[in-house]
Amino acid sequence: MGLKKEFKRDYENKLKQSQIELVKLQDWVIQSGRKIAIIFEGRDAAGKGGTIKRLTEKLNPRYCKVIALAAPNEKEKTQWYYQRYVPYLPSAGEIVIFDRSWYNRGGVEKVMGFCTDKQYIDFLQSCPEFERMIISSGTQLIKYWFSVSAEEQMKRFKARAEDPTKGWKLSPMDLESVNRWDEYSKAKDNMFEHTDTSTSPWFVVESDNKKKARINCIHHFLSLVPFEEIEVSEVALPDRVQQKDYKRPARSNYNYVPEII
């Protein structure tokens, strides 16, 4: 068996097993009333979305939510910076994933000039205290930074540009980030210096290989939550009762979707 096929099989097996464990974790979170918030940050095309998809696709969406907020509107710009994120923090039994978060101010807003120097400094100083309040309220806060190389990012940008189903993923901001690589690096380093704390640490995911990044991140997340397997009763399907007095209307009464395959 070739190395690529062997890796693919190993990846699929590990992903399947990890997703089974994620379902067990969610059952425990729901029953125990735990609250979990996960932050996914990193450069554009670092692989955050693909990992979030694999982490959540087998979970009950009623209790696992992905939050990806648009740029703040004019009203939100006048509010306390963290205000628009607070309503999305988890309640008991919920897992909330932030696909980008309040750390926008420490990254894109700083680099692109969308905030003032004072707002940026205030963020770096207030963020650890904001997260301390989240944690003290009983929420387990986990922060991931997806680290991608400049070469791999450019490769992914080109793939998006050439694929009509992925072109929407390329924004003017993505293209501008190519010219500001070092500025983003400095902003990230400064952000880590101020917000990588003992109570709310950053965990870096090497993501040049997207499949490895997915497995490594999910496995690490599972290791951080001390969940226990909850006994689930087997579902006994009832026998279908035939309704003798029911006659289905003729097919001609309905508008059916044409079958093209």
Image: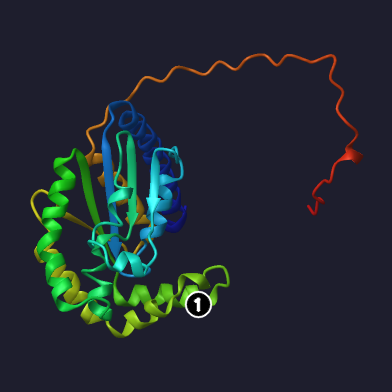
**For mark 1, does the 10 Å Cα neighbourhood hold few (<14), some (14 to 19), or many (20 or more) residues?**
some
Residue at 53 percent of width and 77 percent of height: 162
> Would you say 111 lies left or right of 122 here?
right
Residue 28 in view here:
yes
Q: Position of residue 196 (x, y in %)?
A: 12, 58
Residue 55 in view here:
no
**Residue hosting label 1:** 161
> Would you say 212 lies left or right of 190 here?
right
Q: Position of residue 134 (x, y in %)?
A: 18, 46
Residue at 89 percent of width and 39 percent of height: 253
- The amino acid type of the residue labelled 1 equals Ala
Q: Is residue 150 above or below residue 100?
A: below
Hey, which quadrant is residue 238 in on the image? top right
> Would you say 181 lies left or right of 162 here?
left
Q: Nearer the viewer, residue 231 or 86?
A: 86
Q: Nearer the viewer, residue 73 or 225?
A: 73
